[in-house]
Amino acid sequence: MKKISITFLYLLLSALALGQESKEAKPDSIVQYFSEIKTATKMSYSLWNKDLYGDIILVNPQTRQLFSNNFGTDSSFVQYKNSYIGKLPDSVNIANTSLTWNGRTWAMIMLPLSKDYYARINLLAHELFHSAQSALGFVQNNSESTHLDQENGRIYLRLELEALKKAVCSDAEDEQRMHLKNAFIFRKYRNSLFPGSAHIENQLELNEGIAEYTGVVISGRDKEKTKKHFIDVIDRFFKNPTYVRSFAYNTTPIYGYIMSLKDPLWNQKISVNTDLTIFFMRELNIELPKDLAATVKAITAEYNGKQIFTEEQLRAEKIKQQIALYRSLFVDQPHMTIKFEKMNVSFDPRNILPIADLGTVYPTIRIADNWGILDVKSGALMAPNWDKITVSKPIKIEGQRIEGDGWVMQLKDQYTVQKDESQNNYELIKKQ
């Protein structure tokens, strides 16, 4: 049975927009970061009836130097004050994620961290939740909401988020309730257009959405800073090439924040089986009209609808051209297919591109497996069931190092690349 470990780069990219340290982190700064998050999680103990502070690794992606708040079992870390310094091996992918390695389960976060205290704590708390979520009863599930790369999926997600922006900024209860109701109308209408999409969206919201809500709460922003934070992250989110895996960072935290004004500990009422949309609507006493289509038509203009429709129509045309190019590259032209054995993968979820039944193109992705390491900078096609990946044909083979256009692979000695002369394609095989 193949083992798959998935890590995301998204939160690093969010933090970049908030401004990060340009210089390499100093050990004394790292000690301060650990102290800050330790205090913040302790102060928010009541959120989950648990102190989420745990083992943390902060890693420099360029040098792989790491700083941790605990030692590893292999004794390779060097102590510095209340922290430790070491190096992450090449076999471990670097990302903001929960990592089981060196005898512990770590919250791994990439350096540099944001200069902004609240953004820094938000990110650290998000990843600490992931380390603790199994103990809290939330099994990780990262289904791809591929419908959110389609024109109507994107349109009605953007309209939902525009309504949420107005809801979170409304001080009058009636006004906030109206915008909140409209957000749910756009959501339910979107789900009606794509059967099964509500369940798929809910899975990611229970994972990344709840993690991000936890980060927002533990960050300790006041009311005005929280409002500004939500507006800023949504406006940045709109600029993402795709919304497939990153939408939950923006939806659940706002619904959760509004819910917390009524019940600060609402999150303790949910489980991995909760339908968050149904839960929020019930707890907030939101009732939707029977004719969603007619209501959507009537309220769209209030939420920048005209501009959204125009922008998404233009994008849809460009995406058709991209898909045609990728289909040619990974299907029609000579290519190489790599099967997984025990795969660990990290990627940026903001720019992936689903291609019907062929799978999903990941412009940047790094994979570590029994056969070695694959580093892609210019696109690779992941199969729908995540059992293999396709890259363009190799153009240079030197021993165990294989290079293609925008990708490089370092193979272990027992593996090699073989050409299928009948198909003019390549495959990775194990030496006999």
Image (spheres, rainbow, N blue to C red):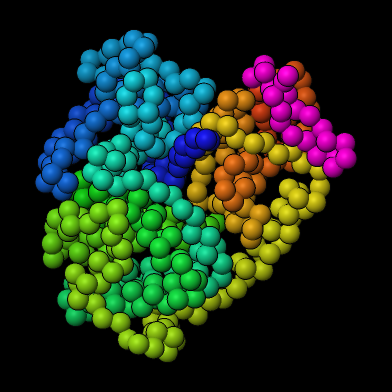
User: Which residue is situated farthest in the right direction here?
Assistant: 422
Quarter-wise, where is residue 139 in the image?
A: top left
Q: Residue at image x 49%, y 30%?
A: 93
Residue 234 appears in the picture as rendered: no
Q: Nearer the viewer, residue 196 or 349?
A: 196
Q: Is residue 376 above or below residue 255?
A: above
Q: Is residue 177 above or below residue 13?
A: below
Q: Residue at image x 50%, y 64%?
A: 148
Q: Position of residue 131 (x, y in %)?
A: 30, 36
On-image quarter of the C terminus: top right
Quarter-wise, where is residue 233 in the image?
A: bottom left
Q: Residue at image x 62%, y 52%?
A: 359
Residue 73 appears in the picture as rendered: yes
Q: Position of residue 428 (x, y in %)?
A: 71, 31
User: Which residue is situated farthest in the front direction here?
Assistant: 1
92 sits to left or right of 378:
left
Magenta region includes residue 413: yes
Q: Position of residue 18 (x, y in %)?
A: 37, 47
69 sits to left or right of 207:
left
Q: Residue at image x 71%, y 39%?
A: 337
**Magenta stretch?**
412-432
Q: Position of residue 270 (x, y in %)?
A: 22, 57
